[in-house]
Image (cartoon, rainbow, N blue to C red):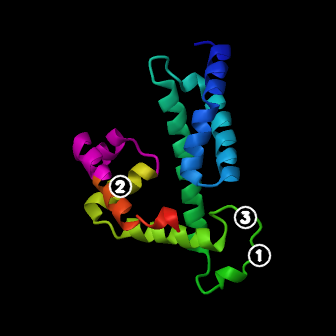
Amino acid sequence: MNALQFQKKLLSMQENMMNFALMLTANRDDAQDLMQDTTLKVLDSQEKFVDNINFKGWVLTVMRNIFINNYHKIVRTQTLMDQSVDLYNLDVVNESAFDSPDGAFHIQEITNAINRLNEELKVPFSMFVSGYRYNEIAEKLGIPVGTVKSRIFFARRELKKVLKDFRHS
């Protein structure tokens, strides 16, 4: 696929990308930022795309990875914050869901839910969310790829149960 075809294909996906970004962020401004970041990353990584790969799946995977990496930055920032500070009296510069006190609470809630998973599920899930591929996780943990996939599946299922009210709050 030449550069022009690649760009046209990417432009034709804007609606899909926005829908996925909204699902991930639940905030229109954050979704637009995520979409822009993804578009830039995809254009920068054009040479990495292999023609026989599902283009839509590849682009949405790039978006998901950017979202996850941003989430990890936020968690690290939250971890470094002094927990004795009154979060409701902070001078919040950016009003995105993750930077607000409520967003910080939700991130902590998600982090706590992940930390409560048993080690068998938590380790592969955390590695996956950190950007490791299934085969890399399998190799590092010395277990079959199918086992890695099933443990990640069970971790997601457990987190969905524990955080079922999260999206509605």
Image check: 124 left or right of 105?
A: left
Residue 21: image x %, image y %?
Answer: 59, 45
Residue density around tag 2, few if under 14, some if 14–19, many if 20 or more, within 10 Å: some
Residue 94: image x %, image y %?
Answer: 74, 63
Residue corresponding to mark 3: 95
Farthest residue in the top direction? 2
Residue corresponding to mark 2: 156
The verdict on residue 33 being magenta is: no
Q: Residue at x 71, y 51 (%)?
A: 29
Q: Secondary structure at mark 1?
A: loop
Give the alpha-carbon distance from disc 1 to disc 3, as whole Å.
10 Å
Above or below 26: residue 132: above
Residue density around tag 1, few if under 14, some if 14–19, many if 20 or more, within 10 Å: few
Give the alpha-carbon distance from disc 1 to disc 2, as whole Å.
34 Å
Inspect the image, locate mark 1, and give the three-letter code of the amino acid beneath it. Asp
Q: Residue at x 32, y 39 (%)?
A: 135
Q: Secondary structure at mark 2?
A: helix
Q: Secondary structure at mark 3?
A: loop
Residue corresponding to mark 1: 91
Q: Nearer the viewer, mark 1 or mark 3?
A: 3
Q: Which residues are magenta?
A: 130-153
Residue 146: image x %, image y %?
Answer: 23, 41
Whether pointer 1 and pointer 3 mark residues with C-beta atoms closer than 8 Å, the reply is no
Mark earlier in primary sequence (1, 2): 1
Inspect the image, locate mark 3, and give the three-letter code of the amino acid beneath it. Glu
Give the alpha-carbon distance from disc 3 to disc 2, as whole Å.
28 Å
Farthest residue in the front direction? 168
